[in-house]
Image (cartoon, grey):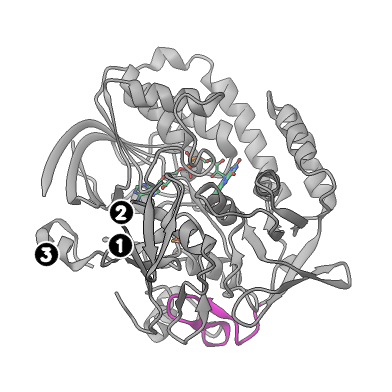
Amino acid sequence: MPELTLEGMRVTARPGTTVLAALQNAGLSPLRFSLGGESRGALCGMGSCAECRAVVDGLTVRTCLTPVRDGQDVRRLLEVSRED
Amino acid sequence: MKTDLWDAVVVGAGPAGLMSALTTAQGGLGVLLLDAQPGPGGQIWRGAAAGQKGAAGELLRAVATHPAITVLGGAEVIAAEAGGRTHTLTVTSAAGLRQIHASRIILATGATERFLPFDGWTLPGVVGAGGLQAMSKGGLDVRGRRVVVAGSGPLLLAVAAGLRHKGARVLAVAEQAGLPAVAAFGVAAARLPGKSREALALAAGLLGVPYWAGCAVVRASGQHGLQSVTLRRGRREVTLDCDYLAVGFGLVPDTRVAALLGCPLDGAGAVHVNAWQATGVSGVYAAGEVCGIGGVDGALLEGFVAGCAAGGQIERLHDAPRRAGLQRRFQATLERSFALRPAQLPTPSPRTIVCRCEDVRHGELRGFTDWTAAKLQTRCGMGACQGRVCGPATETLYGWHFGGVRAPLLPLPLAQLLDEPTTLSPP
Ligand SMILES: Cc1cc2nc3c(=O)[nH]c(=O)nc-3n(C[C@H](O)[C@H](O)[C@H](O)COP(=O)(O)OP(=O)(O)OC[C@H]3O[C@@H](n4cnc5c(N)ncnc54)[C@H](O)[C@@H]3O)c2cc1C
Ligand code: FES
């Protein structure tokens, strides 16, 4: 089973699942803060809302489209900023 | 950047895309099938395995083992240009940007959910209805979680049954359409081959779950995450404590790639096609929910027709007009039965956020007459989702037409752009 690091915490996840599911199952909420500082979580689950974005191995990605892989390092975007 | 030339490219690997890729390849063409999701299956067959029992497993296996089909997952079309003979798609994936040329393109990009704003809808725990289904198929553990499913459409039932099967506690299904309309839909569905069995299975999976027709979502409440949802049934308000509110108001065809190619849309905002699933652009076909919302059977049928047409196998289409007629009638009933009723929709307050990416509120937006003016003044629709959430919402709320589709369809990492900046059309 892939083992990944979520905010410094090591977890295992079933192969074929998403980084989003790993974050949610670890209870990491909120996923990010909005421009106005509101707590936010995933919305669409299919790649269209971008609410689930987080930094995986240094790149900002939509975690609902990102499969878990062994050794991934995942960080939430907890600073309020325009990051794109 | 790599350059490729294909006989045919299919965009979207849901039921429509899988079926059209297979059918096209059977006509002797080399086919590239690509999808933004890591694996094939689309929305309904997300995470299904090739070879598993049933229609999904058989089709996935036939596609995976066909020598003339190449499947590319995690590949998203972000720009598209129609040419006279060959069309060009720009695709982003973990491997970088890639430009793909083909004389035939089949668009099977499916649909997205319509989300409507109400107080509390931005709280973590408020998710799409299909959205929660997708998350659970993606590995989210919903065992023991209390879920309220709300909004509109037959998808709510599929979602409630799916979540329950995964161990969630579905507290209620709240549908905005009225009971007579929902019943009319049930009767029409039962007349289609195979559908009545499906409906029975759904009903069995939902035994004991209250189904409230004519029910409106009022607000979601909580501090940093969802704690409860308030619904309105008749004149009474009901508040339910829950972990998830799974809420969606029907599906909207995802016509972004079609728009970039210049394909005309119909009055309902779907890609306009003729009886052969050909769009208004020569060599470009479309199939499935991008052409109108009609479920998996319609998607498969249209995928077959598009594949026959693109692959020059007109003789295989002898039974298609009859099946298409049945499907169109089903689709019309679906549309009528679950038409959104303004009085039963959530009402945003001036403080309710409408554009989640830029935190633009209803009070700032309702004074504008169209999307372009609002965008210039407020940045509504200019954030990371590029209007994919607020576009359909402002259409329902204010009657605006979202005209903001341009390449690239998503903000790209700078490194990829620098790799080959000339391939993207100017904003
Ligand atoms: C979130 C969601 C969940 C759903 N869950 C169910 C369910 O559980 N049961 C059910 O009966 N119905 C479900 N539906 C309804 C479902 O849409 C239809 O039944 C059926 O899947 C439609 O098939 P399709 O092939 O037309 O499109 P889809 O299955 O939607 O496939 C379209 C594919 O195109 C891809 N795509 C779109 N744009 C691009 C691009 N630019 N580049 C690359 N790829 C792209 C998408 O990633 C997607 O995989 C769901 C719908 C949604 C939106
Ligand atoms: S949850 Fe919407 S893009 Fe991932």
Residue type at the position of mark 2: Leu
Q: Chain of mark 1?
A: B
The numbered dot on residue B418 is 3
Quadrant housing the C terminus of chain B: bottom left
> Mark 3 belongs to which amino acid?
Leu
Q: Where on the picture, by quarter, is residue A75?
A: bottom left
Return the mark for residue B260: 2
Q: Which mark is residue A16?
A: none
Tell me if residue A77 is in the magenta stretch. Answer: no
Please give the range of residues in magenta.
B348-364
Compute the Cα span from label 2 to label 1: 7 Å
Name the N-terminal-most of marks 3 and 1. 1
Could you say which is closer to the camera, residue B46 or residue B334?
Answer: B46
Q: Are marks 3 and 1 on the same chain?
A: yes
Residue B113: x percent and y percent? 55, 56
- Marks 2,1: beta carbons within 8 A: yes
For the point 61% across and 34% down, the residue is B328
Q: Name the side, left or right, on which B140 lies relative to A62.
A: right
Q: Is residue B298 left or right of residue B311?
A: right
Of the pair B397 and A16, the residue shown nearer to us: A16
Magenta region includes residue B362: yes
Of callouts 3 and 2, the N-terminal one = 2
Rendering coords of residue B170 (x, y %): 74, 55
The residue labelled by disc 1 is: B406
Check the residue under mark 3 and report the chain it is in: B
Q: Are marks 3 and 2 in contact (CB under 8 Å)?
A: no
Residue occupying image coordinates x 68% and y 59%: B145
Mark 2 lies within 8 Å of ligand 1 (Cβ measured): no
Q: Is residue B276 visible?
A: no
Give the spatial CA distance, label 3 vs label 1: 19 Å
